Amino acid sequence: MPRPRLYKGLVQVYTGDSKGKTTAALGQCLRAVGHGFYVCFIQFIKGGAYTGELYSTQRLHPNFDFRQYGITCPYSTLIRQGEEKCHGCGKCFPSRGKDNTEHERMTRMGFSTAEKAVCSGEYDIVVLDEINQAVHQGFLTTDEVLDLLDKKLPYVEVILTGRDAHPAIVERADLVTEMTLRKHPFQKGIISRRGIEY
């Protein structure tokens, strides 16, 4: 008996300046694997080998392929052990004015994986987590992402996350959700919390 396939694969975008984009994508994937679908979750820019989603997806289901293409945090071992916290130092994230060559190289590796994933027939949902930021930072072009979406198989759902989604990507999507910041614990000086933000 053939495995289940999505009736129709669409394009979703989760963007905006507030928390919840990656979380929403993970929730969508959890629902899908519950129905026997196969997921490839590709994180761009993020290389935090201590994140809860990395460990939970490895434990939860063999249908959930989780990959990271980012620079690893120098404190990841201590954070994973619960002996240190993420302080938002920015060492693992790109920023304007510093050499981002390695971030771009890792992004290109992840994008190559994404191209294979959306065309392979192996996956039903492909998440491109933080790809909007990869485009915003100039590591990928909007046209490259649009071409990727044009290549996807008809039954493959593609979810793109990250702030600053390009208008052309928003236009191309079938569903767009924008997380709007109204309140955030950061505004009270509360730093990222294990199990909540990572």
Image (tube, helix red, strand yellow):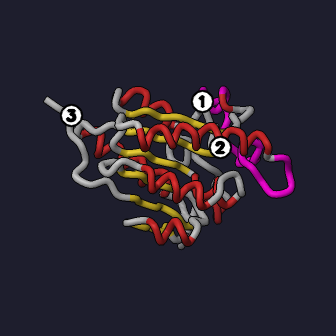
Q: Is residue 31 above or below residue 3?
A: below
Q: Residue type at mark 2? A: Thr
| Residue 17 visible to the viewer | no
**Residue 30 or 39: which is nearer the viewer?**
39
> How far is the residue under mark 2 from the one under mark 1?
24 Å
Q: How many numbered markers are drawn?
A: 3
* Magenta highlight: main SS: loop
Q: Which residue is drawn at 54% across and 67% down?
A: 16
Name the disc covering residue 3, or none: 3
Q: Which residue is disc 1 drawn over?
A: 80
CA gap between label 3 and label 2 equals 31 Å
Residue identified by numbered label 2: 107
Q: What element carries label 3?
A: loop
Question: Which portion, as a residue range, is magenta?
Answer: 77-99
Residues marked 2 and 1 touching at CB (< 8 Å): no
Towards the viewer: 56 or 28: 28
17 left or right of 62 in image: right
Amino acid at dot 1: Arg
| Mark closer to the observer (2, 1) | 2
Within-10-Å neighbours for mark 3: few <14, some 14–19, many 20+: few
In terms of sequence position, does the residue under pointer 3 or pointer 2 come before the other?
3
- Please state if 24 lies on the left or on the right of 1 as rendered: right
Q: Can residue 30 be seen in this view?
A: yes
User: Does residue 2 appear left or right of residue 156 in this picture?
Assistant: left
Q: Where is residue 28 in the image (x, y as percent from the top left)?
A: 35, 50
Query: Relative to residue 193, is residue 173 drawn left or right?
Result: left
Callout 2 secondary element = helix
- The percent coordinates of residue 133 (x first, y second) are 63, 57
Q: Where is residue 161 in the image (x, y as percent from the top left)?
A: 51, 56
| CA distance separating discs 1 and 3 | 36 Å
